[in-house]
Image: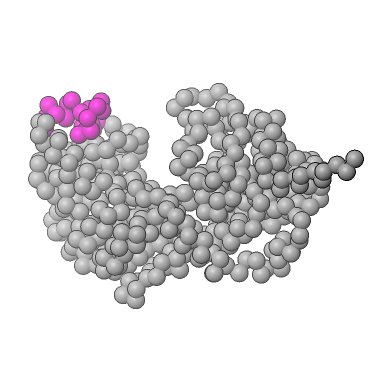
């Protein structure tokens, strides 16, 4: 981007800052997505042919990992500008949490493409105060504008220098997602898909840097996949990621929410990595768990971050009492519920670790049942995965809480979630999965799966007893009578 074009983008951001401060919400909303509220007005303004062509062009860069590979190899994003009908190029980007912002200046003036992960969703034209949706999403457009402006503003003059520099000569792939389910199924799934499709060599040849945000990564990516010598691996915090990209003037694109999924080949790779790399079973506090014959080892995850489960203490108490009734004192627990970065532990990690520890100790004291505990919530994913291979069954909310014992180690277990649920079969993949009944608390239907809920305790106990019966060895046949 030339200095003159960069100045135009910079001035557009200054005008956006004034609008944000004054609360102005006067943008024109358009959409090339058929069936959406603004599609008819868009067709009337741009014509059916251009709308259809824009939809086709963006479908080529839908965010799938093979499309990410093409963009990395080209070190640019070429897209059809729906307003002008001309091809426009972007080589500069910033990242904020789940969003990527690709900046451009073209026939329709300065603007940016908003991507969620690697998938383009909306084109924002800052000079024309118009946005064009190219994919359905639920994000508030004015919030997105404020996030993009705030991300650039935090970088101060560094952002202006970055966009005015020549097109990058080197490319970086950013791997990581703040949700473990997305990180493992999609970011790592995308890399595994390159291997399965025999495209891994092309991927490594297309990039100069592999950037892994340590607060969005749960497994050390360069330990899981063999990185060639010419690719430099950078672990950095998400807050410093943009500065790394700017300092090196990189074309950066994300392999995140890339349409990939957990495959058996990825699961086998992760399990093998944990089994060979983790020393967890050699730790003194863990070694005693593996040396006790006749004990049952049960994995329980505490739902700690979002507070949707309203009777969690009752669930844990019911679990403890049922285990006591069935197995006596021959029970040992692995308490999970949080996953600090494999590289660093921050203040949030310390706070949540302390909260989980206080919760399970209080619950054990209140219900009068004490079992030995290993605190999985302070371990890295690598060590959890190895430990989960030694459990008998698990009890968790589904989703991220169940990903280690269920999706990766495929142990039997019980999950629960609000009645709205999620795509449970997509999030949790396990051969023997029991689902406990729950009751949603009254809330707006717009909340959907974020609705607070309670586990039906009698139904949970019945489900747990059923699981225990099914896992028990079959009784030997009675000896024939001699009378």
With 458 as the anchor, is 412 left or right in this view?
Answer: left
Residue 465: x and y, percent? 71, 38
Q: Report which quarter residue 129 is drawn in.
A: top left
Residue 168: x and y, percent? 21, 64
Residue 334: x and y, percent? 67, 53
With 321 as the anchor, is 134 left or right in this view?
Answer: left
With 38 as the anchor, is 350 left or right in this view?
Answer: right
| Quarter that holds the C terminus | top right
Name the residue nearer the viewer: 338 or 335: 335
* Residue 41 within the segment the image draws in magenta: yes
Determine whether 286 is above or below 154 in the image.
Answer: below
Does the rendering let one see residue 431? yes
Name the residue nearer the viewer: 37 or 262: 262
Residue 164: x and y, percent? 19, 60
The structure residue drawn at horizontal position 67% and vertical position 68%, both measured from the top left corner, is: 283
Q: Which residues are magenta?
A: 26-46
The structure residue drawn at horizontal position 27% and vertical position 41%, both measured from the top left corner, is: 121
Q: Report which quarter residue 41 is drawn in.
A: top left
Q: Residue furthest right?
A: 483
Q: Report which quarter residue 169 is drawn in.
A: bottom left
Name the residue nearer the viewer: 123 or 148: 123
The structure residue drawn at horizontal position 24% and vertical position 27%, both measured from the top left corner, is: 35
| Quarter that holds the N terminus | bottom left
The structure residue drawn at horizontal position 32% and vertical position 33%, both measured from the top left corner, is: 23
Q: Residue furthest front?
A: 483
By what rule are the colours in the image chosen? one colour
């Amino acid at each position: 981007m030339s200095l003159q074009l960069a100045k135009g983008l910079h001035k557009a951001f200054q005008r956006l800052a004034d609008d944000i401060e004054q609360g102005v919400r006067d943008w024109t909303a358009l959409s090339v997505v058929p069936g959406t509220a603004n599609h008819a007005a868009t067709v009337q303004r741009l014509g059916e042919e251009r709308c259809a062509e824009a939809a086709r062009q963006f479908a080529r860069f839908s965010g799938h990992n093979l499309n990410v590979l093409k963009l990395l190899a080209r070190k640019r994003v070429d897209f059809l500008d729906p307003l002008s009908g001309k091809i426009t190029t972007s080589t500069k980007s910033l990242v904020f949490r789940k969003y990527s912002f690709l900046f451009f200046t073209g026939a329709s003036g300065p603007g940016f493409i908003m991507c969620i992960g690697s998938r383009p969703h909306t084109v924002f034209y800052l000079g024309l105060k118009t946005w064009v949706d190219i994919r359905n999403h639920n994000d508030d457009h004015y919030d997105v504008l404020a996030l993009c402006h705030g991300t650039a503003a935090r970088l101060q003059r560094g952002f202006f220098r970055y966009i005015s520099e020549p097109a990058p000569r080197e490319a970086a792939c950013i791997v990581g997602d703040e949700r473990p389910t997305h990180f493992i199924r999609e970011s790592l799934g995308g890399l595994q898909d390159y291997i399965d499709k025999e495209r891994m060599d092309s991927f490594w040849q297309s990039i100069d840097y592999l950037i892994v945000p340590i607060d969005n990564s749960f497994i050390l990516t360069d330990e899981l996949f063999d990185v060639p010598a010419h690719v430099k691996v950078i672990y950095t915090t998400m807050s410093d990621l943009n500065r790394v990209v700017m300092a090196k003037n990189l074309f950066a694109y994300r392999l995140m929410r890339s349409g990939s999924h957990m495959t058996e080949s990825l699961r086998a790779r992760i399990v093998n990595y944990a089994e060979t790399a983790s020393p967890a079973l050699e730790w003194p506090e863990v070694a005693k768990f593996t040396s006790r014959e006749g004990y049952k080892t049960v994995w329980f995850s505490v739902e700690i971050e979002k507070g949707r489960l309203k009777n969690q203490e009752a669930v844990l108490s019911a679990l403890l009492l049922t285990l006591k009734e069935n197995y006596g004192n021959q029970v040992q627990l692995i308490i999970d519920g949080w996953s600090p970065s494999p590289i660093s532990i921050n203040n949030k990690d310390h706070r949540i670790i302390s909260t989980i520890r206080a919760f399970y100790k209080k619950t054990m004291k209140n219900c009068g049942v004490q079992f030995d505990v290993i605190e999985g919530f302070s371990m890295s994913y690598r060590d959890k995965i190895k430990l989960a291979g030694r459990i008998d069954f698990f009890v968790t909310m589904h989703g991220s809480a169940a990903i280690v014992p269920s999706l990766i180690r495929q142990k039997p277990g019980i999950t629960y979630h609000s009645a709205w649920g999620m795509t449970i079969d997509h999030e949790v993949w396990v051969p023997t999965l029991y689902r406990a009944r729950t009751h949603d608390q009254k809330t707006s239907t717009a909340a959907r799966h974020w609705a607070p809920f309670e586990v039906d305790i009698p139904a949970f106990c019945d489900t747990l007893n059923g699981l225990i019966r099914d896992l028990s060895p079959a009784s030997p046949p009675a000896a024939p009578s001699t009378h």
